[in-house]
Amino acid sequence: GLSVAQEFTATQNFNATTLTDASTIAWDASANQVASVTLAGDRTFGAPTNQKDGAVYVLTLIQDGTGTRLISTWNGVFKFAGGTAPTLTTTASAKDVLVFLSNGTNMQEIGRSLNVS
């Protein structure tokens, strides 16, 4: 039952999914708890839809083969550690990983690993 503690004997995970790259990136948090997007230009990141209070979300931002791509605007629901959005690694094919805890409305950054290689 869901009302009692569970012990698992095998790994439990969320399948990683790929978000669609667009001028404004959309994120349906109910379908994409662990997500990545390859940036092919400077982008705006829209407000994720269908967040759940207490859920943890992982976002990997990948530079395309050109690099130099930025998230020029983050929707206001993203709350970053220290109040400052990360400076993305702009090397071609670089990966930056951001981890958020949702309160049902906001994505509160709880971790970042930049230039993961």
Image (cartoon, rainbow, N blue to C red):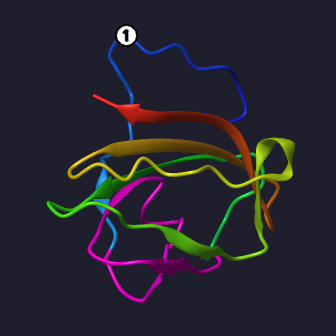
Start and end of the magenta stretch?
20-48
Whether residue 84 sits left or right of residue 31 in the image: it is: right
Figure quadrant of the N terminus: top right
Figure quadrant of the C terminus: top left
Front residue of 84 and 26: 84
Asked if residue 14 is among those painted magenta in the image, a careful observer would answer: no
Amino acid type, callout 1: Thr
Which residue lies at the image location 47% right of the left edge and 36% below the top edge? 114
Q: Which residue is mark 1?
A: 9
Whether residue 62 sits left or right of residue 7 in the image: it is: left
Classify residue 79 by image quadrant.
Answer: bottom right
Front residue of 15 and 95: 95
Task: Kindly state the secondary structure of the residue where label 1 is placed.
Answer: loop
Where in the figure is residue 105, as x and y percent of width and height? 81, 68
Where in the figure is residue 6, as x and y percent of width and height? 58, 20
Q: Residues within 10 Å of mark 1 (few under 14, many from 20)?
A: few
Magenta span: predominant SS is loop
